[in-house]
Image: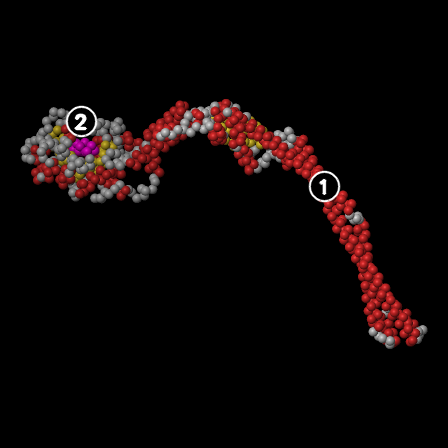
């Protein structure tokens, strides 16, 4: 037999995973809890909505922001431009709506400081404050003056909602209060304050702009006058010519520089020629050769006359000497002219440089004067435009729709009821799951078989009565009931437990009292006796409680007692053991001074059982519970088969485990388990309808709870 340690050890593999179908089945079994909790939640929601909650009335005003500021004069957008329209600007406007400056004006205008809805300090102390006052000398804080106003502003800011309509420049101002007129007044006044704030801001901007333009215009006018005076003084002190004459002087300078270069070239040529001729000395022929080679016009005439013979050698020498002197004179004249031209060019260059610098300075001063005049004229025009624009400012926003008083939006009773029903249902489902988790009994023979590892012989439905005499009467009157068929099915399982030999002595026991053990023993004895030719004896071994007394009529003679037979004070021969009420032969137990366990351990009891085997086909022993007394463990040695009763949904797994271990400790484990007092109605609620094959029999005998 399997040794039981704990419930986890017997849990099938994979049970650690969540079985959604099993969870759904548990919730279905707890449907009455779910429905009850849902109904309670709905009732609580109705009480809260109709009796406790304060109705809240919504109000909403819509303000549209213009894309661009509309100005009378369109040339000064930089001063009076409208607000931006990008996401940053939209978010900024939302924060402007919620600013403490605007909300502070709203609080002051509507007198919200005196409104208890926004000023809880004047209405009543908070719940936490009242609790603290109960346990200590703490006094609630009373706000006054600026602190009270700041608290009210915070409350209003927390209650107001500003939302931007998607893909638009429209803003919704919303609030909920306990008064529909107050809600509408708050959002409408806030919209008006927002528009007034825009106009006031533009007036302030225009005033600052005019002041700035006036100051700058005066400064620029003075600057223009100063620059014009400086220019006039510079013109008086300067002898600068105009640009055309300066250009003519530049042309003259280039001509002088060309003449200087020409004189330099002529002087260099004459100096070279003169040096060559003088290098020949007084040799006429050499001079003539050099003169002819030089090709100079001043020497070519002499050379031509010598070649034609018109000059003789002496005359040619004299002529060449005169020509050399003439070349020297020309060289001197050229050098003097070159020096004169160089001096004239240097003087003209210095004059042009001075004139150019003076002209540049005058032109720069003129540009400064023109720029200052242009800036002055621009600011003067802007000042005139701003003066005209002042007082014509319009807001960049307008009210699209004003708020009107509406019906209460909360509490929304239907939604509250729906939420409460859902929450209540979840609580009920949780209660069902917790009850299932804490459940330690057995509901099916499959659970019993898998957890104990022992054969499950069958199950018995609970009877429609708790009265023991009524149970006996039911067995007599309803031989074809569901219970009767279940007992017959159990009888068949017992007879087929050992294919080689039918059990003759059958022990019926359980872990604890009140598990239907005696009813099971009586039913088995009756239906074993219904088999043709079978003699059956029911032995009441529970001599301490003597439960059979409750099944029979009062005053009926008890007949032969078990203890009397064991002790030899009575004989079975000739004894009438038939009980008219039970409808079978019974050997009842009786109290006395003997210990039951010692009695069952005696040789005489063993001899009694051996004698009964020769007299009866089946002996059913109704044994005391295993965990209560040791009697059952002693009696198992005489039994061919032991039946262990487990009450449906009542006997815990620990009790079953301990009871089976008690029997196993004496080497006689239970041969089969029976699930007793199965509640058919609850089984159907658990989704196990039809599992035991009872649906086709006597539909009117379902168990009462």
* Quarter-of-image position of residue 426: top left
Which SS class for mark 2? Answer: helix
Examine the residues drawn in magenta and state their main secondary structure.
helix
- Magenta includes 514? yes
Give the camera-side residue of 272 and 61: 272
Mark 1 or mark 2: which comes first in sequence? 1
Provide the residue designation for mark 1.
226
Q: Is residue 384 visible?
A: yes
Q: Nearer the viewer, mark 1 or mark 2?
A: 1
Q: Which mark is residue 469?
A: 2
Badge 1: residue crowd in 10 Å (few <14, some 14–19, many ≥20):
few
Q: Disc 1 on helix, strand or loop?
A: helix
Residue at left 56%, top 33%?
169
Measured Cα–Cα span from mark 1 to mark 2 = 134 Å
- Quick check: can you spot residue 492? no
- Residue 47 appears at what percent x and percent y? 38, 24
């Amino acid at each position: 037999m399997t040794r039981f340690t704990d419930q986890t050890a017997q849990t099938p593999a994979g049970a650690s995973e969540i079985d959604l179908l099993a969870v759904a089945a548990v919730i279905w079994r707890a449907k009455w809890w779910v429905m009850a909790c849902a109904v309670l939640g709905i009732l609580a929601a109705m009480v809260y909505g109709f009796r406790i909650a304060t109705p809240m009335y919504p109000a909403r005003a819509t303000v549209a922001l213009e894309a661009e500021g509309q100005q009378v004069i369109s040339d000064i957008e930089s001063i009076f431009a409208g607000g931006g329209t990008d996401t940053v600007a939209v978010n900024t406007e939302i924060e402007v709506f919620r600013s403490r400056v605007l909300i502070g004006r709203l609080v002051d205008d509507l007198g919200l400081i005196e409104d208890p809805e926004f000023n809880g300090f004047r209405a009543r102390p908070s719940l936490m404050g009242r609790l603290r006052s109960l346990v200590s000398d703490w006094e609630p804080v009373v706000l006054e003056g600026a602190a009270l106003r700041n608290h009210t502003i915070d409350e209003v800011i927390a209650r107001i909602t500003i939302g931007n309509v998607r893909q638009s420049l429209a803003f919704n101002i919303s609030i909920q209060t306990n008064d529909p007129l107050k809600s509408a007044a708050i959002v409408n006044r806030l919209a008006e304050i927002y528009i007034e704030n825009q106009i006031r801001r533009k007036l302030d901007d225009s005033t600052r702009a005019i002041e700035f333009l006036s100051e700058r215009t005066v400064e620029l006018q003075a600057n223009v006058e100063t620059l014009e005076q400086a220019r006039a003084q510079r013109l008086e002190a300067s002898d600068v010519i105009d640009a055309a004459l300066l250009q003519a002087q530049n042309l003259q300078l280039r001509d002088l520089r060309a003449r200087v270069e020409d004189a330099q070239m002529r002087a260099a040529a004459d100096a070279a020629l003169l040096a060559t001729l003088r290098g020949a000395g007084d040799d006429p022929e050499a001079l003539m050769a050099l003169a002819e080679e030089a090709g100079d016009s001043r020497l070519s005439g002499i050379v031509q006359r010598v070649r034609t013979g018109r000059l003789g050698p002496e005359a040619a020498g004299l002529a060449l000497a005169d020509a050399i002197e003439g070349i020297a004179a020309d060289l001197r004249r050229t050098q003097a002219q070159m020096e004169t031209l160089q001096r004239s060019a240097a003087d003209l260059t210095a004059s042009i440089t001075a004139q150019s610098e003076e002209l540049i300075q005058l032109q720069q001063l003129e540009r400064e004067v023109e720029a200052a005049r242009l800036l002055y004229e621009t600011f003067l025009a802007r000042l005139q435009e701003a003066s005209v624009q002042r007082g014509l400012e319009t807001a960049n926003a307008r009210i699209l729709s004003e708020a009107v008083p509406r019906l209460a939006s909360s509490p929304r009773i239907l939604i509250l009821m729906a939420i409460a029903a859902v929450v209540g249902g979840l609580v009920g489902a949780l209660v069902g799951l917790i009850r299932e988790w804490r459940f330690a009994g057995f509901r099916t023979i499959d659970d019993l078989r898998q957890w104990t590892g022992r054969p499950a012989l069958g199950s018995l439905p609970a009877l429609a009565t708790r009265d023991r005499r009524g149970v006996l009467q039911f067995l007599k009157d309803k031989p074809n009931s569901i219970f009767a068929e279940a007992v017959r099915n159990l009888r068949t399982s017992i007879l087929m437990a050992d294919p080689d030999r039918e059990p003759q002595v059958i022990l019926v026991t359980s872990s604890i009292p009140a598990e239907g053990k005696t009813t099971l023993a009586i039913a088995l004895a009756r239906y074993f006796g219904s088999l043709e030719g079978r003699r059956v004896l029911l032995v009441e071994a529970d001599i301490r409680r003597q439960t059979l007394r409750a099944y029979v009529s009062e005053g009926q003679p008890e007949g032969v007692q078990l203890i009397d037979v064991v002790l030899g004070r009575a004989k079975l021969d000739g004894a009438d053991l038939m009980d008219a009420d039970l409808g079978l032969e019974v050997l009842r137990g009786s109290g006395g001074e003997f210990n039951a366990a010692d009695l069952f351990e005696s040789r005489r009891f063993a001899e009694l059982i051996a004698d009964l085997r020769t007299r009866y086909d089946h002996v059913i022993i109704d044994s005391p519970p295993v965990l209560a007394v040791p009697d059952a463990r002693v009696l198992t040695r005489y039994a061919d088969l032991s039946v262990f009763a487990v009450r449906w949904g009542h006997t815990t797994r620990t009790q079953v485990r301990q009871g089976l271990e008690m029997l196993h400790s004496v080497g006689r484990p239970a041969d089969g388990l029976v699930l007793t007092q199965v509640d058919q109605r609850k089984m159907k609620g658990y989704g196990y309808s039809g599992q035991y094959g009872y649906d086709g029999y006597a539909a009117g005998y379902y168990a009462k709870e």
